C-alpha cells in the first residue's frame, strides 16, 4: 500500500493500516479509523523526522528561534529581523564566552548594529587583604559606548548595553553617524 496523503497535506511514511494483518486490512471501517489516526500523528512524525532542522539556527522556523535561544542562554529581541536573530543564535557560544568583558560587549553590539563600536571602561580592579570599611570611596565602574550606526535607535542601543554589561556597572551610550555616511546630512 502506498503512502496516503492526509487532509492536512502531510503524508505519513508509516500508514498504520499497512501494519495490520491482511485479514484486518479488509475491514473498511478499521482502515478509515487508521487513516484518521495517521492524519493526527502525521505532524508529529514530520516534526521528529525534521528534528535536526529545528535545532539548527540557520534552518529552524522563525517562531522556534526564541525557543532555541533558551537552550543556549542567548537573549534575542523579537523586534530584530529573523536573519539577525539566526546570526546571534549561531554565534551565541562565542558571545557568551566573552560576556561581561569590554571585547564581548563590543562584539555583541557590532552584531546588533552592523557598525563600528567603541567601548571604553574605567578599567582596573582593586583588592585588599583587609576588609574595606568605606566601599563608597572606590571608583564606580562605568562603561561608555559609542556606536557608529544608522540601523538602531539610541533607546534600543542603550537597552542592549544594559542587558549585556555586568549589573553593577553604570553605562553611557552615544549614537553617531558612520564616518562617510551622508544620508543623515541635510
Image (tube, rainbow, N blue to C red):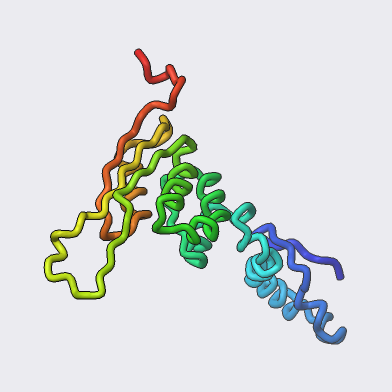
Please, is residue 25 above or below residue 44 in the view? Answer: below
Answer with left or right where residue 153 lies relative to residue 92: left
In the picture, the quarter occupied by the C terminus is top left
Residue 146: x, y in percent?
A: 35, 37
Which of the pair 161/90 is nearer the observer? 161
Residue 52: x, y in percent?
A: 67, 64
Q: Residue visible at 55% across and 54% down?
A: 91
Count of marks placed on residues: 0
Residue 11: x, y in percent?
A: 74, 63
Please, is residue 7 above or below residue 116 in the view? Answer: below
- The image quadrant that residue 126 belongs to is bottom left
Q: Residue visible at 61% across and 63% down?
A: 55
Q: Residue visible at 45% across and 39% down?
A: 113
Please, is residue 33 above or below residue 166 in the view? Answer: below
Q: Residue visible at 78% across and 77% down?
A: 17
Answer with left or right where residue 57 lies relative to residue 145: right
Which of the pair 74/16 is nearer the observer? 74
- Looking at the image, can residue 92 be seen? yes
Residue 59: x, y in percent?
A: 64, 54
- Looking at the image, can residue 64 be seen? no
Answer with left or right where residue 71 lies relative to residue 57: left
Answer with left or right where residue 14 lies relative to residue 147: right
Outermost residue to the top = 186
In the picture, the quarter occupied by the N terminus is bottom right
Please, is residue 92 above or below residue 106 in the view? Answer: below
Amino acid at each position: 500500500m502506498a503512502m496516503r496523503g492526509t487532509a492536512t497535506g502531510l503524508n505519513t511514511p508509516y500508514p498504520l493500516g499497512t501494519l495490520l494483518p491482511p485479514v484486518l486490512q479488509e475491514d473498511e471501517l478499521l482502515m478509515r479509523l487508521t487513516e484518521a489516526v495517521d492524519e493526527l500523528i502525521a505532524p508529529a512524525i514530520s516534526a521528529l523526522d525534521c528534528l535536526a532542522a529545528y535545532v539548527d539556527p540557520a534552518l529552524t522556523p522563525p517562531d522556534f528561534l526564541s525557543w532555541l535561544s533558551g537552550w543556549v542562554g542567548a537573549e534575542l529581541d523579537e523586534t530584530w529581523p529573523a536573519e539577525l536573530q539566526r546570526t546571534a543564535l549561531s554565534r551565541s557560544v562565542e558571545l557568551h564566552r566573552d560576556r561581561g568583558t569590554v571585547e564581548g560587549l563590543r562584539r555583541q553590539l557590532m552584531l546588533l548594529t552592523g557598525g563600528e563600536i567603541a567601548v571604553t571602561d574605567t578599567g582596573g580592579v582593586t583588592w585588599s587583604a583587609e576588609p574595606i570599611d568605606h566601599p563608597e570611596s572606590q571608583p564606580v565602574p562605568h562603561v561608555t559606548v559609542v556606536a557608529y550606526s544608522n540601523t538602531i535607535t539610541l533607546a534600543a542601543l542603550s537597552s542592549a548595553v544594559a542587558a549585556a554589561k555586568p549589573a553593577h556597572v553604570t553605562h553611557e551610550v552615544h549614537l553617531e553617524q558612520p564616518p562617510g555616511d551622508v544620508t543623515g546630512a541635510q
